[in-house]
């Protein structure tokens, strides 16, 4: 019985269980629902939970555990000649056995007999039936494959039986429990609580898992390249890990990348903060509700544009435009028609990233500004202050901590942004201050180091994890600090 | 002459006191809904005028028309004519910011800015350029706090946040803030409704003293408060002005049956 069919049967049992539980509680109540502690629906749900949840858990456990058990059984049945050659060979043989097992169904009894007495080649026979085998194949493999197949079949039937028994038994147990004063409602509530906890812990555990994997890979990198060289090196030149010169290791200086990241993020913030903040002030303080209700979603649409699209925009529009305009400007002033802004430059990336960040700044700031109590506005206006005086002297100071928090959150986005800089900033890892020249960022280099055919043993690839963890720590610190500030601000008005 | 006798003499001269503000046929609409119906109410100079009436009767709405705070409410429209010393305050040539400097306002809930006590009081003088030097500003802050009866309580902590004061102190700080702009009229919208009885008594005493220099219009839900602090009382009901009279007469022998009923607690 296949797993999906089994699940379908469990669902059907669940349906039946629901109506059975509900009907039983109806019967127990003697026609008066008020007699029941819980509504019949809760009794039904309670029975459903017992009929499905344990069965599904057993199913999941079985599906995870049985391959391990079967593998180890088949492995121990392999001939000693194979066993003695070490784990790698055993693993290889096991893989072949599994391939043979897959093809075994397609072979006739005569084929199998021919293979076993050596008159037919295993590999050729299987290839004729459309199953590719990695190695030549040995005679013992047919027997092992047969064992493997039979164990799998047996396991599957046993699993189906056990799961169905658990399901039905759970359902009956729950139905027996139903009584007038039985607190089905509380039991259901507890299951809901548990499922909510499981859902939230998955998110947290995933984060921990990501950090763990990055840390371990970064650890491998730091065993090859010293942390001082990485964190304080000023030259980024990782070289290629070409065949034949695995020993050749480049220089992995973080500083040019970090410098580029911060520089580009700074230019982007320089562009996004005034525009976003002014837009937010207009939306929150001046715009009529009708204008606000159309303009605000429109502005937020910008936030929904995939960043790669901004990347195109930078690559085909903003970059060439800046390059051409700089050519003209230079020509007008010095007579020398030479562009002083490169098409891929810090400015290009900064401006386009700034455009991307405007909706974040304006939307977050708008929320914070509208949170400032109306009483403060009235107080200021009532003293004869104009709107802009009110904004400047009362509302912005009151909202400032929150706005700073919002800006920090935005900055952490700017630091982590990838696609725009990949297309707009260039790949030259240089430390320089001219915003019209290309520079590169941490994220761009991660993309570069992880593009193409990879082997996760050389520092050239592993450096991506060290870069990743560095970036992660930076944005994490920014976010924590931002949340701290925002929370501190919230306490003032609530 | 005793203080009470002076009061009495003042009250008797009430009918000869000139008008500071004149409201003629004032109507207010919130969108389609009409909140005030042709109210004719005049505010006398250096007098406390109390506006009373059940909730939703339009007394706060009328108060807010006097310094055009209704302008800040979406969909609010005012018709009729209101003058302040002969100037039509709804005339397009009138600068609303200037008007609000002449007609200050104290709100229902104390709303000090999240700034220091000093900055709260100096806010108005600063934006209107009323003090040329730091010394002048210091003096304005001190006299305003003294007028609001708060100076002795806060003089040692002028640079602590105004939000750290107690509710009653905060409200007196807001009064000091309004006074610092040297307005001609001060509007108070239920200034004591968020305060405890002791703080209320202090604010009422303060209103009494402010009367010498300012014209005061106060909205209140408390009949006793209206009787205690005001010389003239206006009764609103369902957006109409029911009766306007000397406070003494209003609370002893009102002309209108509805006023009688409201004061006796039969509705409201």
Image (tube, grey):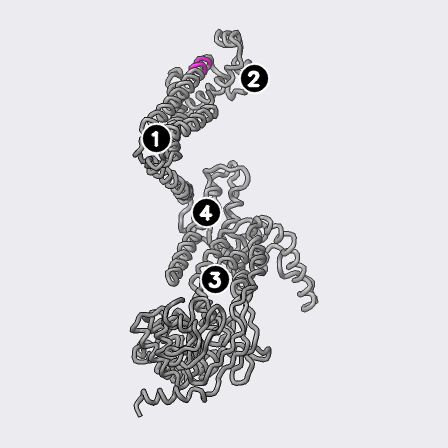
Can marks 4 and 1 be said to lie on one chain? yes
Q: Secondary structure at mark 1?
A: loop
Question: CA separation, marks 3 and 4?
Answer: 37 Å
Mark 2, Cα crowd under 10 Å, few <14 / some 14-19 / many 20+, is: few
State whether discs 4 and 2 lie on one chain.
Answer: yes
Residue A127 numbered mark, or none: 2
* Residue A145 covered by magenta stretch: yes
Q: Which residues are magenta?
A: A142-147
User: Which residue is label 4 attached to?
Assistant: A468
Q: Vertical placement of B216 versus A62: above or below?
A: below
What is the crowding at mark 4: few (fewer than 14 residues within 10 Å), some, or many (at least 20)? Answer: many
| Marks 1 and 3, the one that precedes in the sequence | 1
Q: CA distance from mark 4 to mark 1?
A: 65 Å
Circle 1 residues within 10 Å: few <14, some 14–19, many ≥20: few
Q: What whole-number distance in Å separates the C-alpha atoms at marks 3 and 2?
A: 71 Å
Give the residue displayed 57% in from the left and 16% down from the top.
A129
Gap between marks 1 and 3 measured at Cα:
57 Å
The residue under label 3 is A370
- Label 4 sits on a secondary structure element that is helix
Label 3: element kind: helix
Q: Quadrant of residue B93?
A: bottom right
Image quarter (top left, top right, bottom left or bottom right) of the C terminus of chain A: bottom left
């Amino acid at each position: 019985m296949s797993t999906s069919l089994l699940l379908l049967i469990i669902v059907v049992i669940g349906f039946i269980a629901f109506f059975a539980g509900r009907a039983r509680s109806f019967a127990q109540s003697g026609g008066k629902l008020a007699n029941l502690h819980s509504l019949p629906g809760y009794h039904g749900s309670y029975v459903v939970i017992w009929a499905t949840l344990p069965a599904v858990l057993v199913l999941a456990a079985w599906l995870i555990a049985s391959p391990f058990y079967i593998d180890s059984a088949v492995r121990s049945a392999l001939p000693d000649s194979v066993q003695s050659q070490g784990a790698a060979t055993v693993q290889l043989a096991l893989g072949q056995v599994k391939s043979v097992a897959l093809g075994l169904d397609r072979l006739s009894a005569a084929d199998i007999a021919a293979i076993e007495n050596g008159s037919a080649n295993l590999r050729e026979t299987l290839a004729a039936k459309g199953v590719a085998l990695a190695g030549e194949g040995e005679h013992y493999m047919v027997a092992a494959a047969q064992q493997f197949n039979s164990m799998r079949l047996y396991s599957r039937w046993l699993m189906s039986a056990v799961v169905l028994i658990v399901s039905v038994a759970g359902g009956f147990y729950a139905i027996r429990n139903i009584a007038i004063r039985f607190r089905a409602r509380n039991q259901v509530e507890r299951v809901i609580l548990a499922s909510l906890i499981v859902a939230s812990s998955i998110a947290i555990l995933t984060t921990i898992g990501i950090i763990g994997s990055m840390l371990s890979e970064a650890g491998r990198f730091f065993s090859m390249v010293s942390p001082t060289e990485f964190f304080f090196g000023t030259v980024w030149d990782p070289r290629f890990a070409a065949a034949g010169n695995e020993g050749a290791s480049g220089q992995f200086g973080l500083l040019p990348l970090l410098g580029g990241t911060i520089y580009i993020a700074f230019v982007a913030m320089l562009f996004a903060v005034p525009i976003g903040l002014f837009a937010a002030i207009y939306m929150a303080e001046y715009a009529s509700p009708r204008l606000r209700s159309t303009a605000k979603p429109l502005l937020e649409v910008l936030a929904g544009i995939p960043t790669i699209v901004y990347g195109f925009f930078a690559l085909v529009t903003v970059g060439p435009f800046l390059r051409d305009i700089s050519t003209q400007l230079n020509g007008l002033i010095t007579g020398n028609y030479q562009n002083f802004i490169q098409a891929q430059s810090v400015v290009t990336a900064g401006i386009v990233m700034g455009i991307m960040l405007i909706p974040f700044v304006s939307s977050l700031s708008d929320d914070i500004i509208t949170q400032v109590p109306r009483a403060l506005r009235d107080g200021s206006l009532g003293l004869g202050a104009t709107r802009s005086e009110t904004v400047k002297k009362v509302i912005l100071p009151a909202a400032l901590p929150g706005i700073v928090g919002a800006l920090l959150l935005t900055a952490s986005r700017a630091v982590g942004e990838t696609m725009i800089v990949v297309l707009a900033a260039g790949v030259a890892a240089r430390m320089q201050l001219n915003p019209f020249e290309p520079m590169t960022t941490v994220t761009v280099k991660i993309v570069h180091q992880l593009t193409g055919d990879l082997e996760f043993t050389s520092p050239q690839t592993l450096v991506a994890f060290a870069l990743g963890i560095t970036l992660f720590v930076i944005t994490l610190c920014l976010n924590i600090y931002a949340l701290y500030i925002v929370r501190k601000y919230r306490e003032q008005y609530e | 002459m005793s203080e009470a006798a002076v009061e009495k003499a003042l009250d008797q001269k009430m009918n000869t006191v000139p008008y500071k503000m004149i409201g003629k046929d004032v109507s207010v609409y919130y969108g389609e809904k009409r909140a005030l119906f042709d109210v004719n109410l005049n505010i006398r100079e250096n007098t406390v005028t109390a506006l009373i009436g059940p909730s939703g009767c339009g007394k706060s709405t009328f108060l807010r028309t006097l310094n055009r705070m209704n302008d800040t409410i979406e969909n609010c429209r005012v018709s009729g004519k209101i003058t302040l010393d002969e100037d039509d305050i709804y005339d397009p040539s009138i600068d609303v910011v200037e008007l609000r400097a002449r007609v200050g306002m104290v709100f229902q809930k104390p709303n000090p800015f999240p700034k220091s006590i000093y900055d709260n009081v100096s806010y108005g003088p600063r934006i209107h350029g009323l003090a040329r030097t730091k010394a002048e500003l210091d003096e304005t802050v001190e006299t305003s706090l003294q007028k609001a009866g708060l100076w002795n309580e806060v003089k040692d902590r002028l640079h602590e946040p105004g939000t750290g004061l107690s509710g009653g102190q905060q409200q007196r700080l807001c009064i000091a803030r309004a006074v610092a702009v040297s307005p001609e009229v001060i509007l108070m919208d239920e200034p004591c409704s968020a305060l405890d009885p002791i703080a209320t008594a202090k604010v009422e005493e303060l209103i009494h003293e402010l009367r010498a220099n300012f014209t005061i219009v106060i909205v209140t839900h408390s009949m006793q408060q209206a009787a205690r602090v005001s010389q003239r009382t206006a009764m609103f009901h369902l957006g109409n002005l029911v009766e306007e009279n000397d406070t003494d007469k209003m609370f002893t022998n009102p002309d209108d049956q509805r006023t009688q009923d409201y004061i006796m607690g039969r509705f409201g």
